[in-house]
Image (cartoon, rainbow, N blue to C red):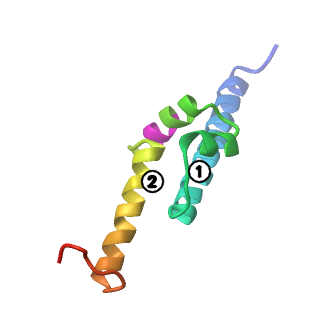
C-alpha cells in the first residue's frame, strides 16, 4: 500500500506540471500576440483540450486565453500610440 503522503505529493506534482503548461501558453501569447492565435491551437501546443485550457488558464491568470490575448494586443497598441510609432486615424 502507498504511503498516505504520496498521493498528495503526486497531486502537487501534477499541479506544478499543469501550471508550467499554462505558463508556456501565456508566454507564447506574449511572444506571438501579433500572429493569428486561437484557443484550439494554444490547447494543442499544451497537449490539453480547449475547454480544459480555458478553465485552467482563467483560474490561474484571471482571464480566458482569448481575453488575455486581446488585452495583450490592446496594451501593445497603446504603447505604439504613446510612443508615436502609430498615429490615430481619428485624430
Is residue 19 placed above or below 55 in the rendered structure? below
Residue reaching furthest to the left: 91
x, y percentage for residue 5?
68, 26
Separation (CA) of disc 2 from disc 1: 11 Å
Q: In this rendered view, identify the residue nearer to me: 74 or 62.
A: 74
> In the image, what residue occupies the spot 54% across and 53% down?
26
Secondary structure beneath dot 1 equals helix
- Mark 2 surroundings: few (<14), some (14-19) or many (≥20) residues within 10 A: many
Question: In the current view of this chain or complex, which residue is farthest to the top?
Answer: 1
* Residue at 39%, 44% in the rendered image: 63
Where is residue 50? Give x, y as percent: 58, 33
The majority secondary structure of the magenta stretch comes to helix
Residue topped by disc 2: 69
**With 67 as the anchor, is 55 left or right in this view?**
right
**What range is drawn magenta here?**
56-60
**Mark 1 crowdedness (10 Å alpha carbons): few <14, some 14-19, many ≥20:** many
Give the residue at x 65% y 29%: 11
**SS at mark 2?**
helix
Furthest-bottom residue in view? 84
Picture quadrant where residue 74 is located: bottom left
The mark that comes first in sequence, 2 or 1, is: 1
Where does label 1 land, which residue?
25
Q: Quadrant of residue 75?
A: bottom left
| Residues at circles 2 and 1 in contact by the CB criterion of under 8 Å | no
Amino acid at each position: 500500500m502507498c504511503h498516505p503522503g504520496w498521493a498528495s505529493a503526486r497531486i502537487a506534482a501534477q499541479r506544478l506540471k499543469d501550471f508550467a503548461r499554462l505558463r508556456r501558453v501565456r508566454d507564447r501569447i506574449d511572444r506571438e500576440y501579433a500572429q493569428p492565435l486561437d484557443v484550439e491551437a494554444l490547447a494543442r501546443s499544451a497537449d490539453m483540450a480547449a475547454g480544459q485550457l480555458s478553465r485552467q488558464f482563467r483560474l490561474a491568470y484571471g482571464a480566458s486565453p482569448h481575453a488575455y490575448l486581446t488585452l495583450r494586443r490592446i496594451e501593445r497598441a497603446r504603447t505604439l500610440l504613446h510612443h508615436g510609432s502609430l498615429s490615430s486615424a481619428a485624430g
